[in-house]
DNA sequence: GAGTTATATGCGCGTCAAGGAATATGCAAG
DNA sequence: CTTGCATATTCCTTGACGCGCATATAACTC
């Protein structure tokens, strides 16, 4: 659950796709397999990496294992990002755009990667 | 460049250290070498990866090449993070600050899951 | 021009991670 | 207990990555 495992987990595009899927709603492994087009063993391995990074939790429902996002590591990412946010806010300000200080308002679309 | 290069660039701890160094102030390659304790070729290669990811720019000053942070890709990271921010804001509201070790959260108030 | 400093690149090597196929485990129904 | 489904794990191969070393390029000085 160190920073290294978190970054390594998110470095893979397939795993980011899985995380994006789990953002919509929790899903079983089979659903993720079908949605991502990966093989079942490969998906299981990716999910294991995500679990070890603390990014997802598992709820066992009979034979199915429903995975859901754990927000904490993403909050850690946000904390890592925080010092840099001032930088690019200032840069935008230099360009003439006025931004409020509230780091909110998720106007952006879901991750496209 | 692409999201993939950005994530791959930041996946390496040494490169994140370089980025953190450049957050303070722009630095020449020699300064980064000394600060990070890496070899000069290795540092140059890491800087190349960071340049190709668009994370740093170079200003040539005589023989020195002063590298500085480019805010745009970090803003892209922030945009990627935005959809998840709502998630962990809500979660903090739900769970308070307690960490639960069991996969099934012992929540008291909310019925929705 | 030669020589020195600052940075970049090419090569070889070890390591590590991803993917695929086959197999093993856990769980439920009959 | 045997069967069938959902998921996890193992083995193997391959490809990418990082490092150290030596060397190449570029710019400044004399």
Image (cartoon, coloured by chain):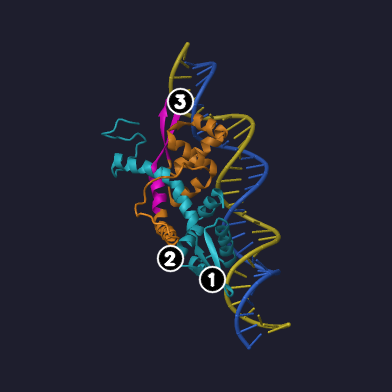
Chain colours: A orange, B cyan, C yellow, D blue
Q: Which mark is residue B24?
A: 2
Pointer 1 or 2: first along the chain: 2
Residue contact at pointers 2 and 3, CB within 8 angstroms: no
Task: Quote the CA–CA distance across marks 1 and 2.
Answer: 16 Å
Asked if marks 1 and 3 fall on the same chain, the answer is no
Q: Name the one closer to the observer, A58 or B81.
A: B81
Please state if A31 lies on the left or on the right of B111 as rendered.
right
- Magenta range is A56-79
Q: Name the one closer to the observer, C7 or B38.
A: C7
* Residue topped by disc 1: B30
Image x and y of residue C28, in percent: 43, 19
Is B15 rendered above or below residue C18? below
* Residue topped by disc 3: A63
Q: Is residue A68 magenta?
A: yes
Asked if marks 2 and 3 fall on the same chain, the answer is no
Is B25 rendered above or below residue A66? below
Image x and y of residue D7, in percent: 49, 31
Q: Quadrant location of residue B89?
A: top left
Q: Quadrant location of residue C18?
A: top right
The residue at the point 29 percent across, 33 percent down is B110
The residue at the point 55 percent across, 55 percent down is B53
Query: Which chain does the numbered disc 2 sit on?
Result: B
Query: Which chain does the numbered disc 1 sit on?
Result: B
Task: Quote the CA–CA distance across marks 1 and 3.
Answer: 57 Å
Residue A74 visible:
yes
Crowd class of label 3 (few under 14; some 14 to 19; many from 20; radius 10 Å) = few
The residue at the point 52 percent across, 35 percent down is A44
């Amino acid at each position: 659950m160190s920073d290294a495992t978190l970054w390594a987990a998110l470095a893979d595009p397939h795993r980011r796709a899985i995380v994006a899927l789990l953002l919509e709603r929790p899903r079983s492994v089979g659903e993720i397999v079908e949605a991502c087009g990966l093989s079942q063993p490969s998906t299981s391995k990716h999910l294991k990496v995500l679990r070890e990074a603390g990014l997802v939790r598992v709820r066992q429902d009979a034979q199915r294992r429903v995975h859901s996002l754990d927000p904490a590591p993403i909050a850690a990412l946000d904390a890592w990002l925080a010092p840099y946010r001032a930088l690019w806010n200032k840069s935008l300000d230099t360009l003439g755009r006025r931004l409020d200080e509230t780091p909110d308002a998720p106007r952006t679309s879901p991750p496209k990667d």
